[in-house]
Amino acid sequence: MFWKKKKPKKDPKKLTREQIIAQAKANAAAAREEIGDETLQKIKEAMEKRESSAFAQAKKKVKSMDDDKVRDNLSLWLKEDD
């Protein structure tokens, strides 16, 4: 009858969580070998430098502030522009 729903068949080719994790680790190891340690170190240093920029520090400071205080300061700042 039309009101009975057919159950979806499970795909036997679908990978399990453990298989996906193992595959991701193998891919990461292969990429690490292909790129090389020196290049990875340069990428790491560039990311650390970007995180220590003035803009990133300001973002961290705003995130750590009280939400109400940030909202009040922003509304005052917008009113000053008008």
Image: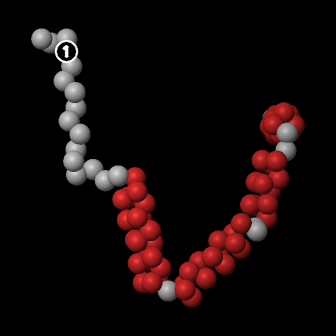
**Where is residue 57 drawn, in percent x and y?**
79, 60
Residue extending furthest toward the left: 1
| Residue 81 appearing in the image | yes
Which residue is nearer to you in this view: 27 or 71?
A: 27
Residue at 27%, 50% (x, y): give it.
Answer: 14
Q: Is residue 51 left or right of residue 35?
A: right
Which residue is nearer to you in this view: 24 or 46?
A: 24
Q: Is residue 42 left or right of residue 28?
A: right
Quadrant of the snapshot with the N terminus: top left
Residue 31 vs 66, above or below: the answer is below
**Where is residue 46 drawn, in percent x and y?**
65, 76
Residue at 23%, 39% (x, y): give it.
Answer: 10
**Where is residue 51 drawn, in percent x and y?**
71, 66
Residue at 15%, 12% (x, y): give it.
Answer: 2
Q: Is residue 24 left or right of residue 40?
A: left
Secondary structure under the numbered disc 1 in the rendered image: loop
**Where is residue 24 drawn, in percent x and y?**
42, 65
Q: Amino acid at mark 1?
A: Lys
| Residue hosting label 1 | 4
Q: Is residue 45 left or right of residue 79?
A: left
| Residue 77 appearing in the image | no
Quadrant of the snapshot with the C terminus: top right
Question: In which quarter of the view is residue 25 placed?
Answer: bottom left
Residue 38 vs 7, above or below: the answer is below
Residue at 37%, 65% (x, y): give it.
Answer: 23
Question: In which quarter of the view is residue 70 placed?
Answer: top right
Question: In which quarter of the view is residue 9 placed?
Answer: top left
Are there few (<14), some (14-19), or many (20+) residues within 10 Å of tag 1?
Answer: few
